Each structure stands twice: as C-alpha cells, then as structure tokens.
Amino acid sequence: MQTPQIVYAARSDKGRARRNNEDNLYCCGTFLTDDIRNLPFRTEGRAAVPAVFAVFDGIGGEHLGEYASLTAVLTLKEHAANIAGAGPERNDEAVRVFVAETNRRIRDESEKSSVSMGTTMVLAVVDKSGIRAYSIGDSRIYVLDRDGFRQVNTDQTLAMRKVAEGLITEAEARRSRDWSMLTACIGIPVDNGAYSEVQIDPPVPLTGKTRLLLCSDGLSDMVPDDRIEQILRSEQSVDKAVKVLMSEALNNGGRDNITIIAADI
C-alpha cells in the first residue's frame, strides 16, 4: 500500500463578536500560544503519516475557556507521539489516556480557582489504515472522499439528543435554544460528577484522495453544511478552501471564535 501524503492548512480567528479567542488547535505540533491567540492565525505545510490534528473550543468565559483549551493542547503535545505511534489497535486507549489527563489538569485548576471551565474536542489520527476520529462536545469532523461528503462525528448537545430520540427534526434542532447546550465536554463534570468519556467515531478508510476538515462550531454555526461541502469541492488547494471558509464565517456574522483545519490525504 502506498504511504499516504498529507497537505494541510489551518486558520483561527476570534470572530466579530468576541473579545478574545478561546479556541485552540493542534496541527502537527503547531498550536496557538498566548501571545498570538487573539491575532488572525494561519499555517500550512506537509506531513508524513502518522499525523495528529485537533481542534479545541474552550468553555467558561474570558480567560477560563482559553486556559482550558490551552491546557488541552499542551497535554496533547505531550501525548501526540504516543497517540500517533500506538497503531490502529491501540489508538483508542492512547486517546483515552490523553483525555483523562486533560480532564484531571482542568479539574484541578477549576477546584483551585473555584470556577468552572472546560473545552470541546475533535481529534483525528491519520495513518496508513485511514482516519480515526474522536470527539467530545459540538466541534466537528467532516470528510470528503469518493463516497461523498459527511460529518463523521455526532454533536453532543441537548438538541441533537432530542433528534436521536425522535422528538424533533434536525432542522428544528438548529432553531432550538438547546442547539448549543452541551451534553459532554472535557473538564466540566456532568450532573453525577463524572467526566465525559471520549466519543470514538467510526474510522474512515482511505480509498483514494480524501479531504479532512476539523472545525469549532464558530464555522459550522455560521456556514451550513451544503455550503461547506461546495467550498471543499470547488477549491483545489486546502489553503484556499480554509481561507474561503473563514471569510464566509466572518461575513455571515462571526458570532463566535472560528478555528479550521483542512488536510488533503
């Protein structure tokens, strides 16, 4: 089997309405540090497999959400080599270990400061066997390949739980006030005091050229899926695709922080 090659691009922006950027990203070792987080950010490059990509959307308000997402990305930096090198049979456990350690660090800081903070996560491991996807919360992973365009993970929100239970349609969910009510995140415990387990999403085999997209809800809430698909299909380079997606999210209101990673495999 030919070794996959990866070309990637990423952007992050605080948006039109927020004073600071509580998002963070991990893109083959690159992430947002405190000194650059609130500036428009972009990066691009090439990577060999295995490679790890992730987006984190912090929760907890000014300085708290950004601390949680930065804690997550710094913890991932420590664990990325283990996750990438674990292989398909052990990726799941390596990601669980990373999430548990991130939970512990955010929880300890929350208890010390007597405040609640947390972060959502989408994480993708790309190796020769395909893409393994992991998520907590409502950030998203999309794939475009010969089988079409689709969201790989499921939003962990109260609205989408009602959709799964057949109580409302997905169109009604998007208009619902429960649309952004998270049922899972890293750091903030649920009602019974337990912390969220990582959602292990169906693996995506590589069956030819595949375009991967990870994003915070600052993109998916501002740009509908059919438009995201259109942009991913029409733009030849991932750098241009990410640029157009970011511009569209900002032009549509930019009500939240926006973080996007795209990769051609």
Image (cartoon, rainbow, N blue to C red):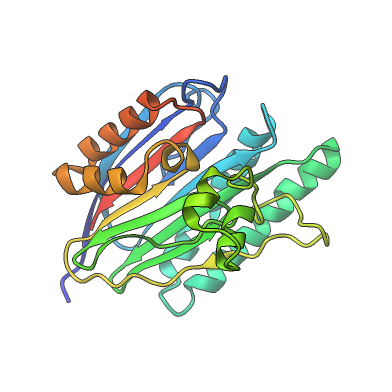
Which one is in front, 170 or 229?
170
Q: In the shown orientation, is residue 249 left or right of residue 9?
A: right
| Placement of 187 over or under 133, stated as above or below | above
**Residue at image location 42% in from the left, 72% down from the top:** 202
Residue 120 image offset from top left, x and y in percent:
58, 49
Taking the image as shown, residue 210 lies to the left or right of residue 66, namely: left
Query: Which residue shows up at 45% across the image and 80% down it?
Result: 89
Q: How many marks?
A: 0
Q: Position of residue 252 (x, y in %)?
A: 39, 27
Closer to the camera in the image, 19 or 123: 19
Q: Quadrant of the C terminus?
A: bottom left
Quadrant housing residue 228: top left
Q: Viewer-proximal residue, 26 or 152?
A: 152
* Residue found 29% across the figure and 43% down from its top: 227
Residue 77 visible in the current orientation = no
Q: Position of residue 9 (x, y in %)?
A: 29, 41
Q: Position of residue 167 (x, y in %)?
A: 61, 63
User: Is residue 255 at least partly visible in the picture?
Assistant: yes
Question: Which quadrant would the N terminus be assigned to in this image?
Answer: bottom left
Residue sitting at 69 percent across and 54 percent down?
A: 103
